[in-house]
Amino acid sequence: MHAQCTLRRAVSCAGIGLHSGRKVTLSLKPAAANTGLRFRRSDLGGLEVPASAQHVGGINYATGLSRDTVNVDTVEHLLSALVSLGVDNAIVELNSPEVPIMDGSAAPFVYLIQEAGIRQLSEQRLYIKILRPVALTRGDKRIAVYPSEHFKVTYSIAFDHPLLRHQSRTIRLTETAFVDEIAPARTFTFLKEVEMLRQQGLALGGSLENAVVIGDTGILNNGLRFDDEFVRHKILDVIGDLALLGHALIGHVVVHRGGHGLHTAFAAHLLQERESWTLVDGLEEPGSGVTAPAADALPAVPVGDPVRATR
Ligand SMILES: [Zn+2]
């Protein structure tokens, strides 16, 4: 059994929005048990939108939330860091509509949360434990979750580009694994797409300081943080998007060529598939409960034609 957690104290940082290019101050504040993760717009008199699948709005190369007149964009990297460090309850206060992009990864948010510290609350944490597989397919993009004793993610990507034609990785998520292997992986874009994004009024704050930019013959940045930084970033993204479930997941998530639209649609779909999961108050002890299938018993993930996918 695990207690719900919040932050020990309030912390803040400043940056710019990747898509809006606007300056923003972000504050993370402690919250009571069962508050969940909530975004608050101080520039809109403190109106709030919960980090919940039912409030997804404005998927446009990033995950946005909206409720009534409140919207918040690019929530996924921050949510990924919060849930991976065990923060169940917090207020995320912004004075602008977009979460700062920082360096394009979740590492700066990890440092911020570590600076705040974690405090246990008296209520117990509830997990969504997967009992039966659930899948969602859109064309050659697919996401599924299978029963497992742990939270694991397998992700594969395929692009029509020599640098990242195919990458795949499986990781069992623990706080340490997230901090060391996933959080530092930066968002990425193709140079060809940058002009198109800017014409759409997106990526206005984008630069080599906050994204890996892939040109025709190589990356424009000064090297990668991991050989497979791209697929690691996709794992970071799906963890953040599945934070919208509102509970930590006990199951094995398998994604092929996903993006924010697919991830968030799956979160909403999974919540509807009420007979496929149950709420439990802790991780099963080894040797008890439902036996997880061996990794090689999972259905093969089809590799589609490599074409450009959204991130
Ligand atoms: Zn991302």
Image: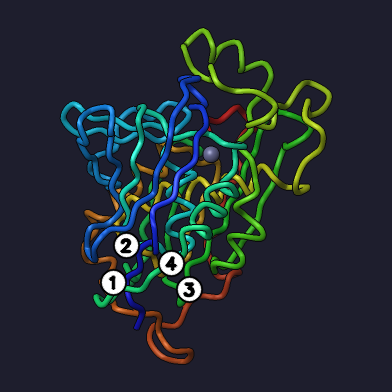
Residue 213, quarter of picture: top right
Of the image marks 2 and 1, the number of the one nearer the N terminus: 1
Q: Amino acid at mark 4?
A: Ile
Q: Nearer the viewer, mark 1 or mark 3?
A: 1
Q: Which mark is residue 118?
A: 4
On screen, residue 98 versus residue 275, left or right, reads: right
State yes or no: Cβ of the residue under disc 3 lies below 8 Å from any atom of ligand 1.
no
Circles 2 and 4, Cβ within 8 Å, touching? The answer is: no
| Between discs 1 and 4, the one toward the N terminus | 4
| Left/right of residue 62 with respect to residue 160 in the rendered view | left
Q: What amino acid type should be assigned to the residue bearing mark 3? A: His
Which three-letter amino acid code belongs to the residue tagged 1? Leu
Q: CA distance from mark 2 to mark 1?
A: 6 Å
Q: Is residue 155 above or below residue 125?
A: above
Vertical arrangement, residue 243 with respect to residue 123, above or below: above
Secondary structure state at the residue bearing disc 4: strand
Label 1: few (<14), some (14–19) or many (≥20) C-alpha neighbours in 10 Å: many
The percent coordinates of residue 202 (x first, y second) are 49, 17
Q: Pointer 2: residues within 10 angstroms few (<14), some, or many (20+)? A: some
Disc tally is: 4
Q: Nearer the viewer, mark 3 or mark 2?
A: 2
Dot 1 corresponds to which residue? Answer: 126
Name the mark on residue 150.
Answer: 3
Q: Secondary structure at mark 2?
A: loop
Q: Give the label, 3 or 4, closer to the camera.
A: 4
Q: CA distance from mark 2 to mark 4?
A: 17 Å
